[in-house]
Image (tube, rainbow, N blue to C red):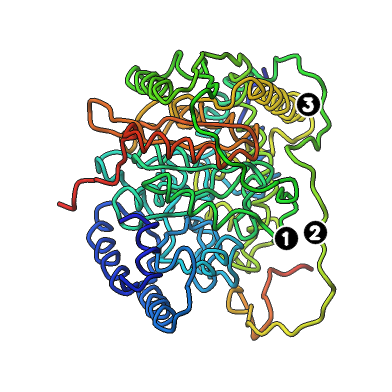
């Protein structure tokens, strides 16, 4: 089984866009190894290859009529950073 | 008081909804300092709604099947105008601008939403200790956890703060707290209750379910929230042919899942499960042991699949559009996202998102994610095959009774193992009811699980009603009064 190292944890944290403190990295290394050790029972199984989208029930498309309406609620109240009715975001360029 | 009799009396004008609500608000204020089941209580709104219900009755208008019944809603389900935190710092300050479909249905039926209950952050956990706002305590023993992730809803019903509550069940999150707090907890067939307005954690698996102190109340609650017509792409209403009448337990074949009473299960839990089998025999059912060896794959398959889905579903929390603000002085967007997510998510949520990203990443995808998908198919097929021969399956809800606070929180794997007996139900998408069935020598409730084929939800609840009528269910509605 693959051994999870600090580098793997840091890489996965970057992919997940989660910044970690140094002590979190070392805790996750040991926890991931113990969890994956238990999960090895599944990785070692000889199981038929499924479709990656295999699921319990079929998805059906949900459509609604394309109706124009005025949205009365002021959704800007939930913006954490804002200027007037606009969302304020980190600089792009 | 039972939801059923509250509604009955309020509809007939024999009981005032305001009086009922006043009593429950009093109970909430007495219990909350001890158990912390709620993250938010809308006292004013609840009393106002009760007044409206009373007015309707006075005018001769029927407020609905849940008239004046107070209900608590798990804080990962949207209720318009109330905070929606998922017990996470990352959603602090967020107030839902709309109602989930189940909440609209409850309102239409005359029920009164009292408030939002505590949970493990984003419903990831089995003890409610992973809430960013502090744990909920088990009303039977304040040093013990109420189970999770819907621990607030379980504790609220068990303590009598509300007669019924909503939770969500991804891998046992309704049934586990029901079992640990001695009440009924129902996980419906996947796709029978709309998930619209339920904050997504693992949408191919999770369902909304309920808590109650009697099987009849569960029947009432489920009859109100079932049958979605909402924009839920997994809605199965079209394949559901309406309630099938339950012919009674006599002559029914029941399979006791051998794997669930083996190694790892506490002896007292095993004993209760056999006593449950005996009760079913007394009712005329034919109980045999049955084995599904591949059940051992269920727990890893469940954690891999749900973590993979969580890593994608929780990508939306970026601190830009709602919730905790991201730092505006970050050098780029990656840094801004990473900082707010690093601060806003708790340890279990970080672990699951990262485990999911790991299982989906190149090099590990075939060994973990695809294997988990294959294992889910296999477990579902095997469970459905067994359910061709047996009308019901039974087993303990959890291998143990409620652990003490802090006992498992530092070892995530030991926490995951609490879900050993509940996750196969979610992988198979079948209905299951956790039934309170006795107590351990230390006085903690024990729950047993009654499972059936997809869409046989009514059968599961009706069977419990039959056992209850025989006096074989030990209900927890008689929790010690507040000290």
Q: CA distance from mark 2 to mark 1?
A: 6 Å
- Same subunit, labels 3 and 2: the answer reads no
Q: Residues within 10 Å of mark 2 (few under 14, many from 20)?
A: few
Provide residue B169's location: percent of width, then percent of height. 54, 43
- Which residue carries the number 3 mark? B366
**B172, B358: nearer the viewer:** B172
Identify the element where label 3 is drawn: helix
Which tag is nearer the camera, tag 3 or tag 2? 2
- Which residue carries the number 2 mark? A62
Q: Residue furthest left?
A: B483
Q: Chain of mark 1?
A: B
Q: CA distance from mark 1 to mark 3?
A: 32 Å
Provide residue A77's location: percent of width, then percent of height. 58, 79
User: Which quadrant of the structure image shows residue A39?
Assistant: top right
- Which residue carries the number 1 mark? B231
Q: Which quarter of the rendered picture does the N terminus of chain B lie within?
A: bottom left
Up-down relation of residue B80 to residue B184 (above or below) = below
Q: Mark yes or no: residue B402 visible.
A: no
Up-down relation of residue B261 to residue A54 (above or below) = above
**A60, B119: nearer the viewer:** A60
Labels 2 and 1 touching (C-beta < 8 A) = yes
Provide residue B253's location: percent of width, then percent of height. 55, 21
Left or right: B16 in relation to A78: left
Q: Chain of mark 2?
A: A
Q: Chain of mark 3?
A: B
Left or right: B2 in relation to A74: left
């Amino acid at each position: 089984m693959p051994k999870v190292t600090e580098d793997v944890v840091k890489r996965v944290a970057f992919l997940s866009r989660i910044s970690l403190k140094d002590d979190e990295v070392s805790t996750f290394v040991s926890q991931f190894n113990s969890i994956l050790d238990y999960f090895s029972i599944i990785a070692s199984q000889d199981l038929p290859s499924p479709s990656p989208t295999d699921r319990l029930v079929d998805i059906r498309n949900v459509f609604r009529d394309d109706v124009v309406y005025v949205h009365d609620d002021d959704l800007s109240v939930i913006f954490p950073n804002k200027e007037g009715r606009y969302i304020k975001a980190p600089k792009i360029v | 008081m039972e939801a059923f009799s509250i509604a009955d009396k309020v509809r007939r004008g024999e009981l005032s909804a305001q009086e009922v609500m006043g009593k429950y608000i009093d109970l909430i204020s007495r219990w909350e300092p001890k158990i912390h089941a709620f993250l938010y209580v809308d006292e004013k709104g609840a009393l106002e709604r009760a007044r409206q219900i009373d007015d309707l009755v006075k005018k001769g208008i029927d407020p609905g099947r849940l008239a004046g019944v107070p209900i608590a809603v798990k804080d990962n389900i949207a209720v318009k105008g109330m905070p929606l935190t998922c017990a996470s710092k990352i959603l602090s300050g967020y107030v839902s601008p709309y109602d989930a479909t189940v909440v609209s249905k409850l309102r239409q039926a005359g029920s009164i939403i009292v408030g939002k209950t505590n949970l493990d952050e984003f419903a990831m956990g089995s003890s409610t200790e992973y809430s960013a706002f502090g744990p909920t305590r088990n009303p039977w023993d304040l040093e013990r956890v109420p189970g999770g992730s819907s621990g607030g809803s379980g504790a609220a019903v068990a303590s009598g703060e509300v007669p019924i509550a909503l939770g969500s069940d991804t891998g046992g999150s309704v049934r586990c707290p029901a079992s640990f707090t001695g009440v009924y907890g129902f996980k419906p067939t996947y796709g029978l209750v709309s998930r619209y307005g339920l904050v997504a954690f693992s949408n191919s698996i999770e369902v909304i379910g309920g808590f109650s102190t009697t099987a009849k109340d569960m029947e009432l609650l489920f009859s109100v929230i079932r049958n979605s017509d909402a924009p839920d792409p997994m809605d199965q209403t079209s394949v559901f042919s309406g309630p099938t009448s339950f012919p009674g337990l006599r002559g029914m074949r029941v399979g006791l899942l051998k794997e669930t009473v083996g190694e790892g299960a506490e002896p007292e839990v095993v004993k209760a499960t056999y006593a449950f089998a005996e009760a079913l025999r007394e009712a005329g059912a034919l109980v045999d042991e049955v084995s599904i060896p591949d059940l051992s794959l269920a727990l890893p398959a469940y954690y891999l699949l749900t973590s993979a889905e969580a890593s994608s579903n929780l990508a939306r929390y970026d601190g830009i559009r709602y919730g905790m603000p991201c730092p505006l002085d970050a050098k780029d967007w990656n840094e801004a996202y990473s900082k707010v997510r690093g601060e806003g998510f708790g340890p279990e949520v970080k672990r699951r998102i990262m485990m999911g990203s790991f299982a989906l990443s190149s090099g590990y995808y075939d060994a973990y994610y695809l294997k988990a998908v294959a294992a889910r198919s296999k477990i579902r097929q095997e469970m459905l095959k067994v359910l061709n021969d047996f009308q019901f399956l039974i087993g303990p809800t959890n291998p143990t009774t409620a652990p003490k606070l802090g006992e498992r929180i530092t070892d995530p794997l030991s926490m995951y193992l609490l879900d050993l007996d509940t996750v196969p139900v979610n992988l198979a998408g079948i209905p299951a009811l956790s039934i309170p069935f006795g107590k351990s020598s230390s006085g903690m409730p024990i729950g047993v699980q009654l499972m059936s084929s997809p869409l046989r939800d009514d059968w599961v609840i009706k069977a419990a009603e039959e056992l209850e009528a025989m006096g074989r269910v030990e209900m927890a509605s008689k929790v010690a009064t507040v000290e």
